[in-house]
Amino acid sequence: MPETAAKTRSFLGHAKLIGGLTLVSRLLGLARDVVASHVFGVGIVATAFSVAFTIPNLFRKLLGEGALSAAFIPLYAQAQKRGSTEHGDTARAFSAGAFNLLLMVLLSLTFIGEGVLGTLLFLERGSDRIDRLLLLQFTAIMLPYVVFVCGGAFLSAILQVHDRFGPPAFAPVILNLCHIAVVVGGAWWLGLRGSDLPSERVQALQTTLGYWLAIAVLVAGALQVAVLWPALRESGFAFRLRAKAWTPSTKKMLRLAAPLAIGAGVLQLSVVIDEAIGFAFMQGVRDDGSVTHFTLLGHVIRYPLELGAPRRLDLAQLLYQFPLGIFATALATAIFPKLSADALEPGRANFKRTLRQGIEAALWEGFPASLGLMLIAVPITRLLFQHGQTDAHNAALIARSAVYFAAGIWAFSLLQVINRAYYAIHDAKTPLIASVMNILLNIAIEIPLMWWMGEAAIALGTMVSFFAQAIVMVYLLDRRLGGLGMAELLQSTGKMLAATALMGAATWAVTLAPFFPRGDSRGDWVAQLAIQMTVAVVVYFGACTALGVNLMTRITTRKGNASRRVPPADIPEP
């Protein structure tokens, strides 16, 4: 078997491992949010906690899994392949110094952030806006989680270069287990179980449990890092406090990371802006009642979003991120080291071949996941979230947003692979420009439509902006690389779309059958999902087989020249 096919099968095998462990993590994450929705609902405590938790996750995407990792992995992979960096540092010395540099940045950001939050809390003394106070308090407690989650993500990048994908994929399981244990155990301990409790008492108990949960996040962060150490030692990494953080190698990493950080920062800023818009335009809560209108230039304007909008959007995002994390993110994580190594070769034939295979695999999952979730959004939302403190009205709002998010799953999946390709060839300018256009288009769509569509406008803006970004970035990459073999890609994509259309038609048609349950009980929702999902899976795989779209077989047996060993070469700066 040619070396290329063996390598491709290897990264697909890694993707299966990551996907399997991510499936466990996502199932636990789903259970975590179902339990949290039951206990907290979508009120001010749940909303404040949800928005506060986005802050450490923002830095995780930016520094841990984002800019530094994207710049570090190609350099470290090439240092492993050549025996040293271009500046003469060993791969081990480079990784230790880079980690020390990241640690100093994270600690500095944490101290600065706590100072800012302390000042804001001081200024909010005596404020009657309970939601704002809770947001600041939860953020202050959880901000040190930045050190653990970003440090752990960077250490995971080291393991990925050494083909150790298991521990990094397992680490998120720990956070979900801790979260579930605290919510379930805390609700039992506090007596937050009965529906006959006064609303003021429920809110007070939820607030106490929210503080416990914020502390548990820090504990889980420490455990997530601890679980990586055995594999790190076996891979040759050792934390050395005296390792030089400022070296020519780390300077080059920072030069590469700077534009990537801007691009990733813009993209993550879109997430923060969505959260901020949801919180700012949401009806608020004071000690003396709710806040439904605000004044602007002498005009009284209605808040367009109902209380709990950010939390409902989080739950809707959970549904589309479930398939995204299981397959697309796992695929992109596994393919990135190979793309980085293949980018060294003249002509980049293997690079383009691997990229085509990654695109096909992302769309093979993305198309049916998009249409499938759109079709089952209502029953799955009711089953998962319509209970406890979350009523039918809130569940309907979650389902409505989930439909718009679902329509963009294929674009989200495609961008996971495409972004890695740009980073592998050290092109940070194109993703940066595309990210800026993404955020501008997103804001231009969602803000005007909020007074008509409510919080679903935020989901619609996200879907449209990522749809446009995915198409543009594939087109530009095709031109940059002198052709990706678009004719072959379009042929396979057409077959996937046909299979997806057949799946959608069959899944919709079965809802018209006389035997399809039409009740409104939990058992009916389970039956509806079971029937629709079974039909969707059978029809899609059957249609793919009939149309000749056997992705895994085609990828591992596709003919191609064996990759030749070439002298190490530097990737030119963009």
Image (cartoon, rainbow, N blue to C red):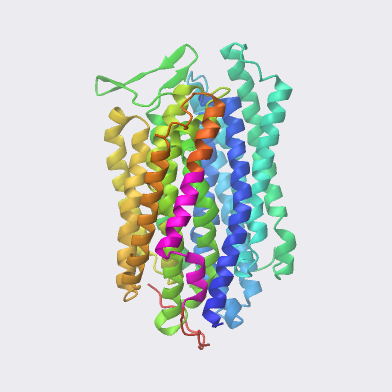
> Does 414 sit above or below residue 516?
below
Magenta residue check for 275? no
557 and 113: which one is in front?
Answer: 557
> Does 22 sit above or below residue 477?
above
> Does 331 sit above or below residue 367?
below
Magenta residue check for 553? yes
Q: Can residue 273 be seen in this view?
A: no
Q: Position of residue 116 (x, y in %)?
A: 52, 38
Range of the magenta residues?
534-558
Q: Position of residue 209 (x, y in %)?
A: 65, 27
Q: Can residue 525 be seen in this view?
A: yes
State which quarter of the image contains the N terminus. Answer: bottom right
Say whether residue 542 is left or right of residue 305: right
Q: Quadrant of residue 17?
A: bottom right
At a point 58% along the width and 35% down the height, the residue shown is 33
> Does 538 sit above or below residue 157?
above
Q: Quadrant of residue 337?
A: bottom right
Q: Where is residue 92 in the image (x, y as percent from the top left)?
A: 66, 73
At a point 51% along the width and 88% down the height, the residue shown is 567
71 and 2: which one is in front?
Answer: 2
Q: Main secondary structure of the magenta part?
A: helix
At a point 36% along the width and 34% down the height, the residue shown is 456
136 and 149: which one is in front?
Answer: 149
Q: Where is residue 313 in the image (x, y as percent from the top left)?
A: 45, 35
Say whether residue 152 is left or right of residue 440: right
